[in-house]
Image (tube, grey):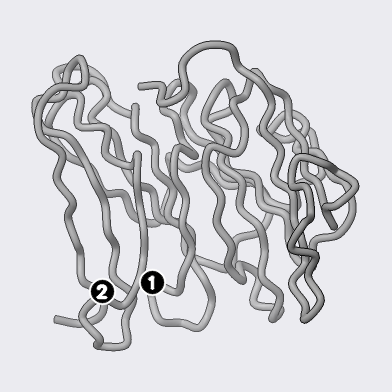
Amino acid sequence: MDPRPGERRPCYPRIVRGSSDVDTDADVDSDVDADAVIEGPAEQYPYVSLATGDLDADGNDDLLIGAYGASAAVSIVLGPVYGNLSTGDARGDGDGDALLVGAEDSNAGSSVTAGDLDGDGVDDVLVGACRLGGGSAPDSGAARLVLGPVLGTRDLTAADATLTVASAYAYLGEQLATGDLDGDGALDVVATWWWEGENDSGAAETHIFHGGTP
């Protein structure tokens, strides 16, 4: 499932730091006006998803970069983030400080979000792999949970928890989000998937999974 068909061109995150005197006329297409630029090869379809969170509990937000093409991985750059960096091969050859690697062709990194889902004070990572699946349920998709702190290289097939569906072409993990939607102080998980969705037909549904103790 490719939301951006056609020629693959590199897409680079550019960071413009906030302050009371932010230049509202800054050209985000220009590296000159950015405080940091993170590059990656076009064939990996990098940066289809972005998120921030404090994954190493040092008080600084870190940057998560989902590259779901040839990589099927999420690169993590620990904050503070400055200067020009490269994810290189998002499966291990670059400036990333940590790496979450999914199964090839799973589109791991199609979405990514971070938050403290287990209530231990350290942010966790939820990674969408919208084309994971096979057999009678191709492209059913999945969401992989990796509990923080997140350091080094982690194999998403050994994630701490996995959300799946049994329907083919559901593409679970294409869109994920977290937030305290019921006001109980615990983060909840929001996930979308399709039903009977071969050739992108069928109905899309959004499901909410409440966190905390029932």
In the image shown, does 186 or 4 lie closer to the viewer? 4
Identify whether 126 is placed above or below 7: below
Q: In this figure, which residue is indicated by the disc labeled 1? A: 117
Residue 135 located left or right of residue 109: left
Residue at 39% x, 43% y: name it.
Answer: 128
Residue 22 located left or right of residue 64: right
**Quadrant location, the C terminus:** bottom left
Identify whether 71 is placed above or below 124: above
Residue at 59% x, 26% y: name it.
Answer: 45
**Tag 1 and tag 2, C-beta contact below 8 Å:** yes
Q: Amino acid at mark 1?
A: Leu
Number of the label disc, if any, that sits on residue 211: 2
Q: Amino acid at mark 2?
A: Gly
Bin the neighbour count of mark 2 within 10 Å (Cα to Cα): few under 14, some 14-19, many 20 and up. many
Quadrant in the picture for residue 74: top right
**Quadrant location, the N terminus:** top left
In the image shown, does 96 or 7 lie closer to the viewer? 7
